Image (cartoon, rainbow, N blue to C red):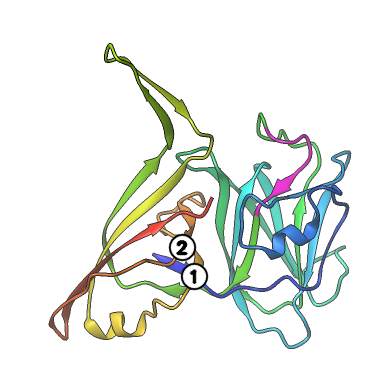
Amino acid sequence: MKLLKEYDSLTVIAASGSNAQFPLINLQSDEPNLRWWADAYTGDVWITVDRGALAPAIDTVFLNNANFPMCRLQGNATNEWTSPAVNILANLGLDRISNRKGWFDLGAFTQRWFRLFIPAAQTLDVGEPTVPALGNLLLGSYVAIPTVGEVQCRVISPKNVQQFINGRIRKKFLGVRRQSLGISLSDDWALFRAFRLDWDIAALSADLGSPADAWLVYGPDESNGTIRHLEDADDSMTLDEVV
């Protein structure tokens, strides 16, 4: 598994156009429900990020709470996009609760400028806005997680429950589902020592081949580690999804 816990603040960001009620600055927040919406979808749509002249190399993009199935991840030394130095096709996927997202490998991305390019004429997800929308755009470098033995992936659907005198029950869904990951790790103790649990919100990839096998999660409330030998240690924790 991979963890993206440090990412660009998106201080210098621009778009082809933005809805006034869902502005681009929403992407500067970790909250996936604070989405950016394009102002129209009559042609191509894009978001550009100026990472700065001295920005370090990065290797990962995480997109979350989107409604478009395909985009291109582009990079260039300047804000000119006729022939970008980096041009990666990215197909986003739906997870178990129908959230469209994706974790994508950029390789050694050293370009100052990043562009998320959303081509025209795509079929957007049903029930979503009629323009491209996005909840998270995270750019950074991942850190490896000690060897994962097991992941328990729970889907939580909170409901309001009514109990009647005759024993009948009625449940009403409250509107927001989320996932909770129970992770068991097993590896050398030195790797656990180096794996810092010092983050509040991060993106996590199961690294199983599907871009949708990734989640935006809170840091663990606690972890339960056991050391048997320098080469025999384990840990377990629960990571709750940010929705």
Q: Are marks 1 and 2 in contact (CB under 8 Å)?
A: yes
The stretch in magenta equals 128-135
Is 173 situated left or right of 190 in this image? Answer: right
Check the picture and name the quadrant holding the N terminus. Answer: bottom left
Is 50 situated left or right of 82 in this image? Answer: left
The residue that appears at 47% across and 29% down in the rendered structure is 173
State the SS at label 2. strand
User: Which numbered disc, 1 or 2, marks the residue that appears first in the sequence?
Assistant: 1
Q: Magenta stretch containing residue 229, yes or no? A: no
Residue 92 percent across, percent down from the top left:
59, 47
Q: Which residue is mark 2?
A: 218
Say what amino acid the circle numbered 2 marks.
Tyr
The front one of 22 and 44 is 22
Question: What label sits on residue 135 in the rendered view?
Answer: none
Is 121 situated left or right of 67 in this image? Answer: right
Say what amino acid the circle numbered 1 marks.
Asp
Question: What label sits on residue 200 in the rendered view?
Answer: 1
Residue 129 percent across, percent down from the top left:
74, 36
Residue 235 percent across, percent down from the top left:
24, 70
For residue 121, above or below residue 17: above
Crowd rating for badge 1 (residues with CA inside 10 Å; few <14, some 14–19, many 20+) = few
Q: Magenta stretch containing residue 133, yes or no? A: yes
The front one of 15 and 120 is 15
The residue that appears at 51% across and 72% down in the rendered structure is 5
